Image: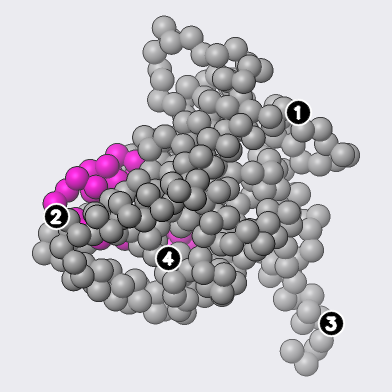
Amino acid sequence: MSEEELPSPEEIVHYDKDPDSRIATITFNRPDRLNATTIGARLRYAQLLHKANVDDDVKVLVIRGVGDDFGSGADLPEVAGLQAESPEVAIRAELGIEDEDVAMPPRGSYRSSSLLAQWYSDARSGCRTLADFKKISIVETKGYCYGWHFYQAADADLVIASDDTLFGHPAFRYAGWGPRMWAWAMTMGLRKFEEMVFTGRPFSAQEMYECGFVNSVVPLAELRGEVNKYATACSRSRPTDAVVMQKSFFQMMKQFQGEYMGSLLTAFLESMGSRVRPDGADLMLNDDTYGAGLNNAVKANDDLFPPECRLSKSGRRRLAEEADRDDPSR
């Protein structure tokens, strides 16, 4: 499928609910692209969360992906294609502003540089929308849980992971930060999150369980059953009004810890990105990188790191293959 033939948001993000159990499910259905979400898919996701938040037939929401992965984040080829057209086209697409009568802030200004990250802090964007969800949310992870999908895991109430899940964000390698920095630091613990940011390496499901980010780790074959167990227990706990009161308590606690302030702070970091100068051949987000293909640049950069720090499954597999060659008894 070409960039001009992106699947519709409805094809990528499926929604269904069972009024009897009061369990709803959002499913990312783009396994051929590692469930990467387009701009339209993220906006649809935000709308579905809003509807489930109001719907009296819903007490618990399960969020999962089709195929081998929960998701690898946003659709970078889509973003790169829009950037190649022009930065203004890209930001208008993200904001959903097609009206040419709306003048965009001049490029290079603080407003222009911080606009996208400020939008990501808005519940309508589909980035931190789950943080404002007043029902119980359960994220089911497997394979890649990177980028935008990692945002959802940070904002979920419960995270159930298969033992093959990798958690992380490629942006730590090509930008240095991501919109949910504060939330990740709160849910992972500062020291372990600093390790993820400074090395850029993904963490395994077991590591995330040990630092308190993940609630349960099971083999992939047992994942669906484990998630169903948690969802059923949550759906049979207290009345929905009590759940909303519980969630309000936790949300106020998160705000006391600075969750939303962290999103605004990330917007400030984003606005300062143009002040970052490479030490040498560092991967930088610029017009040349977008023009050459962001995906290719990220993959090439990944090979510069030790195998255990690599983001791609294939790059990490080479570590095991090298170990087998070094130790024939394995």
* Residue 243 position in % (x across, y down): 23, 59
State the quadrant of the C terminus. bottom right
Q: Secondary structure at mark 2?
A: loop
Q: Quadrant of residue 218?
A: bottom left
Give the CA separation, mark 1 to mark 2: 49 Å
The label nearer to you, 4 versus 3, is 4
Mark 3 touches mark 1? (CB < 8 Å): no
The label nearer to you, 2 versus 3, is 2
Disc 4 marks a residue whose amino acid type is: Val
Give the CA separation, mark 1 to mark 4: 36 Å
Q: Residue furthest right?
A: 280
Residue under label 3: 326
Q: Which residues are magenta?
A: 45-70
Q: Quadrant of residue 287?
A: top right
Disc 1 marks a residue whose amino acid type is: Arg
Residue under label 1: 275
Q: Nearer the viewer, residue 76 or 23?
A: 23
Give the CA separation, mark 4 to mark 3: 37 Å
Residue under label 4: 159
Q: Label 4 neighbourhood size at 10 Å, few (<14), some (14-19), many (20+)?
A: many
